[in-house]
Image: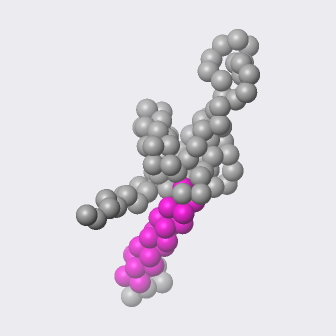
């Protein structure tokens, strides 16, 4: 029986992985990086669904803070997100797929310099 192929990262997932490839981030900084790459504010519910999907696929991992970690006794402890080796591998594969798409678009004259 053939092993089920894992879908390649979506565009938003690539933004998430690319932001983490630059270095570990807390949720706020990670969301800002994704928003910056997307060119728009991504709804937080959508953002956290994508984060959970990336965790489930083994593309990112979460580091829980040591100790109470609560600011002024309120809120959740700040978690740090980082890309895993599997996430780096699939980010590279996704980036290569995007590169091929953009090369074709350029060759067709969609980006200038072609036809």
Taking the spot 60% from the left edge, 38% from the top edge, the residue there is: 62
What x and y, as percent, mark residue 51?
A: 49, 41
Q: Which of 16 and 111 is in front in this view?
A: 16
Taking the spot 50% from the left edge, 61% from the top edge, the residue there is: 90
Q: Nearer the viewer, residue 18 or 89?
A: 89
Q: Which of 115 and 19 is in front in this view?
A: 19
* 94 in the magenta segment: yes
Residue at the far top in the pictured view: 73
Taking the spot 32% from the left edge, 61% from the top edge, the residue there is: 3
Q: Is residue 91 visible?
A: no
- Residue 73, by quadrant, is top right
Residues shaded magenta: 87-110
- Is residue 64 shown above or below 55? above
Residue at the far bottom in the pictured view: 115
What x and y, as percent, mark residue 86?
A: 54, 57
What x and y, as percent, mark residue 11?
A: 44, 56
Residue at the far front in the pictured view: 1
Q: What secondary structure prevails in the magenta region?
A: helix
* 62 in the magenta segment: no
What x and y, as percent, mark residue 49?
A: 43, 37
- In the displayed structure image, the side of residue 114 where residue 29 appears, left or right: right
- Residue 25, by quadrant, is top right
Instruction: Indicate the quadrant containing the N terminus: top left, top right, bottom left or bottom right.
Output: bottom left
- Is residue 95 shown above or below 49? below
Instruction: Indicate the quadrant containing the C terminus: top left, top right, bottom left or bottom right.
Output: bottom left
Taking the spot 66% from the left edge, 13% from the top edge, the residue there is: 74
């Amino acid at each position: 029986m053939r092993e089920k192929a894992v879908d390649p990262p979506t565009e938003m997932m690539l933004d998430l992985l690319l932001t983490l490839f630059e270095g570990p981030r807390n949720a706020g900084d990670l969301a800002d990086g994704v928003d910056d790459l997307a060119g728009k504010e991504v709804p937080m519910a959508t953002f956290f669904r994508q984060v959970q999907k990336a965790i489930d696929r083994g593309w990112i991992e979460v580091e829980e803070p040591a100790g109470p970690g609560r600011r002024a006794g309120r809120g959740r402890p700040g978690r740090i997100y980082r890309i895993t080796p599997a996430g780096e591998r699939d980010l590279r594969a996704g980036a290569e797929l995007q590169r091929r798409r953009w090369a074709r678009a350029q060759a067709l004259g969609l980006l200038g310099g072609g036809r």
